[in-house]
Image: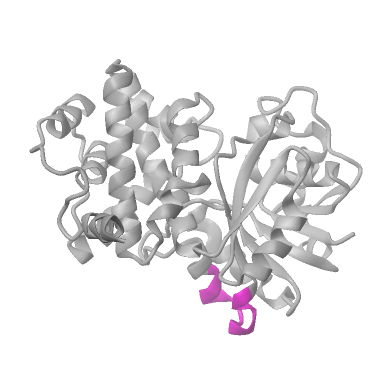
């Protein structure tokens, strides 16, 4: 049975390790220090994810990177997006031609604005670029660890590589689809966290389902426009990595990004909120990168801009919401440098 190495003891990394080990995969979960590894071995999975859960016999926790990667056929990088580069550097000397490298992070790197697959490619030998895959979808750790059914998508530029990853990751309770639109899957997974922040604000303000549905729909259109401008297939944003994940993170109390949005409406400061959380709300950093990209290419992203102002400029969430509601009404597929209207017209003629 192929051995899987998981880099990172995030909730998602632990969840993937447990689920795959339950499915008779041999898994090595790497923790950065012996102290972290020992604590995890003794405590087991986070009880907030699944009470009384234990690690399957096929899952080994280690602080030795060499032990984790020894004879591994697949490496899953389940680390926060802002730490992806340093972790890619750690594994690069262990890679082989037959080893898959799967990013399970949903974010953009601040400063470079790069997607995670691009960050990994920067740090590894070009011979292995075709083995890079990305995993994304509506995947709340607690539900998956509890054995509830879910679906996800794994993308690689080579369909054959995506199928290998699909076969490796699929379980009776986790349906894995494939895609070759790596750009779209990554951008959808990262940008939907911005939408979840706004949805949390809408819920925190008590705006109701009509307003929330309007916000989520407009925000999905906005992030799709950015995806298309960067070369993604717009249909990907209607798939699991886009709409699927938007539905989950904008409606579930288990979503960290939604939680941040709700807490902001209570007058709490961003630093206070994030420092008290167990895990990273990726939308907080992704908002910076997404707005920077949009400004550099001249793309209109009013929702992302308002979320940024709330996060980093002290704008009151109520004022930001009011400004968005007062925006000029026009065709819903039209925005500065959006290509969605032209795509729609072209499809209408075909």
Image location of residue 141, percent across then percent down: 63, 36
Image location of residue 262, percent across then percent down: 37, 24
Q: Is residue 266 visible?
A: no
Query: Which quadrant does the C terminus fall into?
Result: bottom left
Image location of residue 65, percent across then percent down: 76, 63
Relative placement, left or right, of 70 versus 323 is: right
Relative placement, left or right, of 195 versus 47 is: left
For the point 50% across and 51% down, which residue is it? 106
For the point 54% across and 74% down, which residue is it? 121
Q: Say how the picture is coloured.
A: one colour
Please determine whether, in this image, residue 150 is positioned above or below residue 287. Answer: above
Query: Which quadrant does the N terminus fall into?
Result: bottom right
Q: Is residue 63 visible?
A: yes
The residue segment tinted magenta is 120-130
For the point 79% across and 47% down, which residue is it? 20
Please determine whether, in this image, residue 35 is positioned above or below residue 112. Answer: above
Image location of residue 71, percent across then percent down: 85, 68
Q: Is residue 97 magenta?
A: no
Relative placement, left or right, of 4 versus 199 is: right
Please determine whether, in this image, residue 73 is positioned above or below residue 174. Answer: below
Relative placement, left or right, of 160 versus 109 is: right
Residue 6 found in image quarter: bottom right
The majority secondary structure of the magenta stretch comes to helix
């Amino acid at each position: 049975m192929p051995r899987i190495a998981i880099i990172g003891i995030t909730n998602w990394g632990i969840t993937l390790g447990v689920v795959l080990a339950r499915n008779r995969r041999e898994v090595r979960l790497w923790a950065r220090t012996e102290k972290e590894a020992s604590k995890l071995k003794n405590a087991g999975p986070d009880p907030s994810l699944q009470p009384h859960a234990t690690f399957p016999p096929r899952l080994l926790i280690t602080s030795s990177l060499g032990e984790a990667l020894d004879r591994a056929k697949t490496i899953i990088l389940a680390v926060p997006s802002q730490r992806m580069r340093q972790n890619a550097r750690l594994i690069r000397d262990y890679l082989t031609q037959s080893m898959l490298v799967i990013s399970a992070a949903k974010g953009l790197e601040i400063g470079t604005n790069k997607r995670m697959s691009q960050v990994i490619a920067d740090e590894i030998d070009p011979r292995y670029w075709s083995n890079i895959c990305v995993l994304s979808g509506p995947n709340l750790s607690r539900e998956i660890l509890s054995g509830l059914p879910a679906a996800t998508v794994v993308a690689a530029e080579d369909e054959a590589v995506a199928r290998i990853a699909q076969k490796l990751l699929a379980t009776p309770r986790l349906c894995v689809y494939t895609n070759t639109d790596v750009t779209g899957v990554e951008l959808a997974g990262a940008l939907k966290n911005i939408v979840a922040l706004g949805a949390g604000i809408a819920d925190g303000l008590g705006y109701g389902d009509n307003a929330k549905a309007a916000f989520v729909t407009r925000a999905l259109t906005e992030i799709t426009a950015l995806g298309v401008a960067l070369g993604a297939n717009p249909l990907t944003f209607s798939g699991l990595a886009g709409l699927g994940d938007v539905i989950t993170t904008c409606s579930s109390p288990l979503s960290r990004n939604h939680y941040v949005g709700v807490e902001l409406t209570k007058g709490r400061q961003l630093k206070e909120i994030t420092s008290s959380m167990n895990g990273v709300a990726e939308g907080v950093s992704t908002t910076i990168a997404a707005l920077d990209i949009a400004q550099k290419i001249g793309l209109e992203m009013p929702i992302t801009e308002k979320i940024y102002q709330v996060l980093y400029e002290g704008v009151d969430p109520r004022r930001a919401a009011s400004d968005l509601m007062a925006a000029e009404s026009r065709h819903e597929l039209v925005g500065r440098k959006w290509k969605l209207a032209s795509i729609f017209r072209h499809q209408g003629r075909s």
